[in-house]
Amino acid sequence: MAQRLRIALVAHDAKKDALVGWAKRWEAWLAGHALLGTGSSAGEVERACPSLRVERLRSGPEGGDMQVGARIVEGAVDALVFLPDPLNPHPHEADFRALIRVALLADIPFALSPTSADHLARGMSAAEDEGGTAAVHGATVREHGLGDAADGQGYGRHSPAKQARLADARGV
């Protein structure tokens, strides 16, 4: 494996079974990566998949979605699997909308359904099998006014071609 990815796992209560099912299908691949998850999502994945260790953050309503978002902004999450429940209202809806926004701004791969999570895992796994690394953090956080990296280059890792495009876009 070329690079150990950091993958966040988040699911609303009505989607926990779907997240666990996805994690079981991809357990062998996920075992090679660093996982983190919100509250019971992390616990349920660990119980169902004995080979996986998932760093447990707070539950979503207690700020877990914001913790995951902060990790994305810091460049400490490479991909996000977030299975929201579209049928029920949630008191912390603003938090998970912010999580999606941060994932978009950081340009990390993310999935919002089990099918898209399968595609995400399949694509990242194929990139690793080809000897490369999966695409991570396509945009710098600094470009979007969300922070500044100590090295002044923003957060994340980019291919040389992507670094050149970003430098051109910044006028560097």
Image: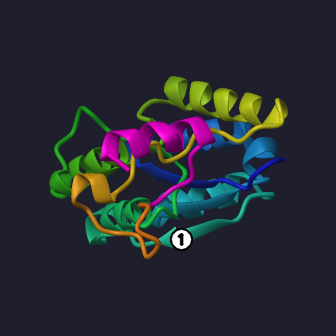
Number of marks present in the image shown: 1
Residue at 55% across, 51% down: 78
Nearer to me, 141 or 11: 141
- Label 1: how many residues lie within 10 Å, few (<14), some (14-19) or many (20+)? some
Nearer to me, 82 or 42: 82
Residue at 44% across, 61% down: 153
In the rendered image, the vertical position of residue 84 relative to residue 74, given as above or below: above
**Hey, which residue is sitting farthest bottom in the picture?**
150
Predominant SS of the magenta segment: helix
x and y percentages locating residue 122 in the rendered image? 68, 27
For residue 33, what is the image quadrant?
A: bottom right
Nearer to me, 171 or 16: 171
x and y percentages locating residue 120 in the rendered image? 58, 31
Circle 1 is placed at which residue position? 56
In the rendered image, the vertical position of residue 127 relative to residue 166, given as above or below: above
In the rendered image, the vertical position of residue 65 relative to residue 13, given as above or below: below
Q: Is residue 158 magenta?
A: yes
Q: Is residue 154 visible?
A: yes
Residue 103 relative to residue 121: left or right = left
For residue 147, what is the image quadrant?
A: bottom left
For residue 55, what is the image quadrant?
A: bottom right
In the rendered image, the vertical position of residue 14 relative to residue 42, given as above or below: above
**Hey, which residue is sitting farthest front in the picture?**
172
Q: Is residue 70 magenta?
A: no
Q: Which residues are magenta?
A: 155-172
Q: Tell me the amino acid under the disc marked 1.
A: Arg
x and y percentages locating residue 19 in the rendered image? 54, 42
Residue at 37% across, 47% down: 103
Q: Is residue 109 visible?
A: no
